[in-house]
Amino acid sequence: MALSRLASSSSSSRSADLLKPLCSAISLRRPISTDTTPITVETSVPFTSHQCDTPSRSVQTNAKELLTFFRDMALMRRMEIAADSLYKAKLIRGFCHLYDGQEAVAVGMEASITKKDCIITAYRDHCTFVARGGTLLEVFAELMGRQAGCSRGKGGSMHFYKKDSNFYGGHGIVGAQVPLGCGLAFAQKYSKDEAVTFALYGDGAANQGQLFEALNISALWDLPAILVCENNHYGMGTAEWRAAKSPAYYKRGDYAPGLKVDGMDALAVKQACTFAKEHALKNGPIILEMDTYRYHGHSMSDPGSTYRTRDEITGVRQERDPVERIRKLILSHDLATEKELKDIEKEIRKEVDDAIAQAKENPLPESSELFTNVYAKGLGVESFGADRKEVRAVLP
Amino acid sequence: MAAIFQGVGAAAALSSLPSNSFDSKNILFSPRRSFSVRKAPSFVVVRSDGTMNLDLNPKGRRAQQFIANAVATKEDSSAASSSSKPGHELLLFEALREGLEEEMERDPRVCVMGEDVGHYGGSYKVTKGLATKFGDLRVLDTPIAENSFTGMGIGAAMTGLRPVVEGMNMGFLLLAFNQISNNCGMLHYTSGGQFTIPIVIRGPGGVGRQLGAEHSQRLESYFQSVPGIQMVACSTPYNAKGLMKAALRSENPVILFEHVLLYNLKERIPDEDYICNLEEAEMVRPGEHVTILTYSRMRYHVMQAAKTLVNKGYDPEVIDIRSLKPFDLYTIGNSVKKTHRVLIVEECMRTGGIGASLTAAITENFHDYLDAPIICLSSQDVPTPYAGRLEEWTVVQPAQIVTAVEQLCQ
């Protein structure tokens, strides 16, 4: 159906080109989209810092990067909205925490680091997983509890992991991932990896004691840990001013330096993360506060409108939407036409629909999977009944 | 297998055990099951008469192992001679340290984190000297923040490091319960097998010498329902070192329960490298009349009661279950099938304790083999009082064990 829309709305030669993957299509028509000549963009607001220098407001980027940002964020946006519909269709059960509105954090962070750096986050992890290299099929299959999911269907929405690209999940208990993240940083220091760990948490989790404990230990041991507070201003239904005496989360590290970043601006996020990585490798932990916003409620069971007004939501959507910002940037620098961007979005929609269809076809896990992976292989290949006569399950 | 050598002056450290009359001899039990995971190196079997056999094929040696001997032969209990006997003598905390040190040398990924483990040497001296030997990055002093440093240990384990997290007292690990239950136990499962958590969480627990309620907690049972972890309890220097090494080599998270009062037990252990199977129970004293299942410190109360029982004409079979999760129902089952009577003696709480689970497991699986209901002697469901005599009565005393056996065997 995307095809027919394309065919009807543009000339045939154009549509033929645009059916090919984005980069090659545009490079045939318009070389500058894969161009890497630097473009300098100013971030929306300057950075504010606590106990450290601020990075410059001018960010170096290029056409290729901007278009990648656009594509990735539009993909994430589409994916989350599709997850919304799937949840309402009862194909996704349980808890489903959506990230739309916050895509810039995931995308900007990814642009500043390598796959050797670790990322660990809480339960709002679908987009971070995709940014780390997860495929749409893995996402939708895991959300629907199928075998092709990234955790074989046994984790669910809150437990996405991707070990080979150093994405450590995916954690349901608020704040528990921050000590884990500092542990990852410890392991990086121990193994002399020259890499950093980004431990993401929300403004709700920022009041957890274990966070400050972990920060203290990280600062004592000089660990390359970057604590990123994704401040979407609401801890489920509680606004930040009602939960935190000091909502200046970047300052709450006290002895640890902090930086406040506009989390809806992917380029600002990228700049801040680059700065933070450099800082953490030399000086130990640093806190980044990403000022961001989520359009959906806390999860699919939360309408999101009982504790904030619809005007607020639409206001942010109009003024600060991350995808729109990149779109405007691309258009103003004449890197692509509006039409091309729309076509990218259509292509993304199709990709998402295909992935959902494929995930729906995927089978549920076998019953024997109930007992697999409880212990690592070291406990024996076969699990017997009590008197060692009856084989209950064969563990992988 | 654990002969408790009583020097005359050792009364203070071993005051919980009966003085100079404790000479029950336990038999070294080498693991005999082929599908126990550990493709272990050759096992060293030290017999009670001092000769040593290198056991390359444990399975075949089943029949010859057990020398029933509740009363020690005099010559073995003298601590004086050391040159003629193989192995070396040390205290339990030194055995733990030796195991830890050997593993740290063998595998550079092993590190220790805990309060006062580094420069101070460990509050029970288990990590003494390790910081100077291995450096501050491998033996890490943490601030008093159990929740976060346990979490950090788990995070480090996710990347492949093999940390040992020491709780200064197991009771303090309650602060880290979320990390242990949710992250340590579950990450292997919820990630679909992507991450293993080869962490070892260890520390002393149990009722000590008037340490007060909060420092004398018996909380093995709190962790027993957590899926994905293994729990073991050591009771002798031999199995302490063996279990420590096995735990460090295991890919699963292991909680190693030590006991405050057992740290100064002395025993002669082999010089060679050996490990104990994590999932296996230890046959302390084979017998015919009744199976007594125990672990940790209660083993010594049971052995003391066993002496009395033998004198009264009973023949108890004593098994140190060692593996608290999962239970070694194979060894236990075989014993139940032989004796048909079971007594469980433990230090855990009465309600919901390890003994309660074990009773259920045995009843469920071996009901037909039982001639009498299982008796479970646990510590009382009270916070441990400070007063000495009250504290004594919180835990099971040998006299109670003797009475229970007599009751069972009627």
Image: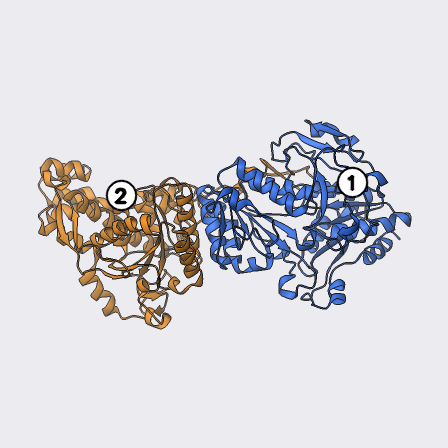
Chain colours: A orange, B blue
**Residue A254 horizontal/vertical position (percent):** 35, 63
Residue at the spot of label 1: B80
Residue at the spot of label 2: A351
* Vertical side of B139 occupied by B170: above or below: below
Q: In the drawing, what numbered circle is on residue A395?
A: none
Q: Between label 2 and label 1, give the one nearer the viewer.
A: 1
Image quadrant in which the N terminus of chain B is located: top right
Q: Residues within 10 Å of mark 2 (few under 14, many from 20)?
A: some
Residue nearest the observer in this picture, B96 or A160: B96
Q: Quadrant of residue B221?
A: bottom right
**Residue A205 horizontal/vertical position (percent):** 39, 62
**Looking at the image, can residue B278 be seen?**
no
Determine contact: label 2, label 1, CB under 8 Å. no
Side of B365 relative to B126 (left or right): right
**Looking at the image, can residue B207 be seen?**
yes
* Vertical side of B58 occupied by B1: above or below: below
**Residue B318 horizontal/vertical position (percent):** 78, 45
